[in-house]
Image (tube, grey):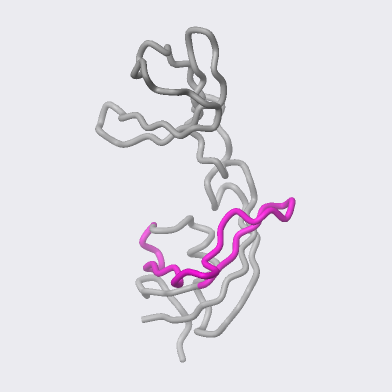
Amino acid sequence: MSAAKNGDTVQIHYTGTLDDGKQFDSSEGREPLEFVLGSGGVIPGFDDAVTGMNVGDKKTVRIEPDRAYGHRQDDMQQEVPKNLLPEEMPLEVGMPLQAQSPDGQTINMSVVEIRDETIIVDANHPLAGQALTFAIELVARA
């Protein structure tokens, strides 16, 4: 049996937790997560963790922000005039919004503050700046 390497299609079960022990994601009760190692389909630290595993192997890894969703960037928060939004849109702190960059890319963000004439949105990934711990089991590879 050979170990998982770049280009292999792998299937894994996982549970992700934060440093405070809070679970943020899991494949429990779902089909295993399938991806191609090294293709950029998952965060780099996840690729690193699965590389070298054999089917049936289990491990727990801690992935620092620079190999996960990056560090929080203050310049990814922006003040937006409310009059640029649909008038009937109900605004709530935490609600997701999407915008389009000049090159047509979709930008996901969330509302972090609502002011009289403006809102503050944050385009940082919700897990940016946090180390992530994953319990991983490699269940298949091709």
The answer to which image quadrant residue 60 occupies is bottom right
Q: Is residue 104 left or right of residue 23?
A: left
* Residue for point 56% across, 76% down: 137
Q: Is residue 31 above or below residue 79?
A: below
Q: Is 31 colored magenta in this rendering?
A: yes
Q: Is residue 85 above or below residue 28?
A: above
Residue 111 picture location, percent across and down: 51, 27
* Residue for point 55% across, 12% down: 115
Classify the position of the C terminus by image quarter.
bottom left
Residue 106 picture location, percent across and down: 32, 36
* Residue for point 34% across, 19% down: 86
Q: Is residue 98 above or below residue 141?
A: above
Residue closer to the observer: 120 or 90: 90
Residue closer to the observer: 97 or 43: 97
* Residue for point 56% across, 57% down: 25
**Farthest residue toward the right?**
20
Residue closer to the observer: 32 or 61: 32
The answer to which image quadrant residue 105 occupies is top left
Residue 13 picture location, percent across and down: 52, 72
Residue 79 picture location, percent across and down: 48, 16
Q: Which residues are magenta?
A: 13-40
Q: Is residue 31 left or right of residue 67?
A: left
* Count of numbered marks: 0
Q: Is 19 colored magenta in this rendering?
A: yes
**Farthest residue toward the bottom?**
1
